[in-house]
Amino acid sequence: MKSDVEKLSPTRVKLSIDVPFNELKPHIDGAYKSLSEKISIPGFRKGKVPAAMIDQRVGRGAVLDEAINAALPTFYSQAAKDNDVLVIGRPNVEITELKDNEKLTFTVEVDIRPEIKLPNFSQIKIEVDDVQVSDADIEEQLQDLRTRFGTLTTVEKVVAKGDFVSIDLVATKDGKDLDGGTANDLSYEVGSASMIDGLDEALIGLSVGNEKSFDTALVGMPADELGTVKVSVKAVKQRELPAVDDAFAKLASEFENLAELKADLATRLSKLKQMQQGAQARDLLMEKLLSSVEIPLPDEIIKDEVNDHLEKEGKLDDDKHRAEVNEEVKKTITREFLLDSIVKAESVAVNESELTEYLVRAAARYGMSPDQFIKEVSQAGQVTTMVAEVARAKALAQVLARVDVVDKSGNKVDLEALAPKSEGSLKANEK
């Protein structure tokens, strides 16, 4: 097989492929075998019909058609590999010449990942925030500790923001109770906006024994419909916070006094802010690259993804939403093209331990066990996507290590020193 590539645009190519007939023969043999199992001819068992009888019954052209349809993906994939073309999207195939027992010639037009000229990362300079731990930062941490060790006390008062209430909820639609729409003895912090839209507004001003109904959107209902929720107040509680003193330091930590606790909080906050410098440097590098690197985008791929998204939402005719989705798709593809070009340039590979570590962290974010998450990812065919995300993060970290990162005071930031050190640390380029 011979092939060559013609660049039609930065994101589209035309592959011309010539296949000698001897390379097509195994596929022709397969076509005869397949057809012999489908047709019935008196005197011959299925699967044992001679080629000559198949030609007589369905025609040599039908055999060639089946053989070519089976062979095209193989020859097309090989041609893309031979010409170092990273194809994306659906190919448009045209048979340009077919001479029986001589050759097959066809062309394929397809979108590709563009060639992106990356900068010299060692010449890039990025400025991040200084590491500063203020008294206010420490006080905020102390307040969080006080909240954690606070106690709830029942009070007789009108419900206000910041109170904790015990409530019953009943959800209805057009006067009929909804399945699973009743909940009793729920504990809720008023003002947290963590349960149902409109609940905070309904609760404020009520007292124990009061109830109030309000209309709101409910899970499982159409977006343009509202249900009715009745909330009943059973108890009102206030959180009492411990005093900030040496006794509190002993209660809330391993330290003997408040001064030691504050010093430890300052150290922890300093380390956290240093880690945030690394995240900020990564984000600023991406911003810089996206604004300075030319990244051509394939129009057809964007159009197809936008249409697929809108079709699932039933909003193909919503021009305003189409424009919004179009911009989001462009941003996503631009980011992926940029990161994938870095992956290729850095020859990044992902090993099993790196993928496993990523999946375990992702499972925790979704509140699932690692085994359950990995099973669902595998069933959904998303493992390849996960591998790509790990490779992109790894590649970005590699080039970020070559960037000159300083804080606003001019001090160099050592990103390597911020990387976590553990036995399970990632190993680069291990297959």
Image (tube, rainbow, N blue to C red):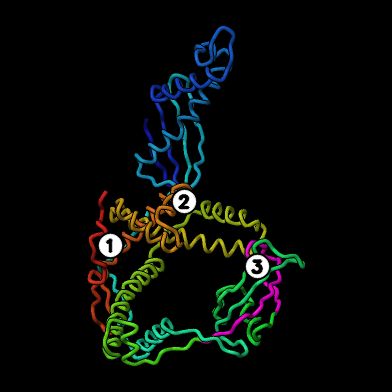
- Residue ID at (24%, 81%): 411
* Residue contact between numbered discs 3 and 2, judged by CB atoms under 8 Å: no
x, y percent for residue 384: 40, 49
Residue 169 visible in image: yes
Which residue position holds label 1?
A: 398
Mark carried by residue 376: 2
Disc with the residue nearer the chain's start (3 vs 1): 3
Mark carried by residue 182: 3
Quadrant that contains the N terminus: top left
Q: Which residues are the magenta region?
A: 212-238
Above or below — where is 146 with respect to 35? below
Left or right: where 28 falls relative to 82: right
- Badge 2: how crowded within 10 Å, few (<14), some, or many (20+)? few
Mark 3 element type = strand
Q: Amino acid at mark 1?
A: Gln
Above or below — where is 214 with respect to 25? below
Instruction: Between residue 386 and residue 249, name the one nearer to us.
Output: 249
Disc with the residue nearer the chain's start (3 vs 2): 3
Disc with the residue nearer the chain's start (2 vs 1): 2
Left or right: where 253 falls relative to 166: left
Marks 3 and 1 sit apart, C-alpha to C-alpha, by 52 Å
Instruction: Between residue 272 and residue 78, name the one nearer to us.
Output: 272
x, y percent for residue 47: 50, 16
x, y percent for residue 286: 38, 67
* Residue contact between numbered discs 3 and 1, judged by CB atoms under 8 Å: no
Instruction: Between residue 323 and residue 396, name the one nearer to us.
Output: 396
Of circles 3 and 2, which is in front? Answer: 3
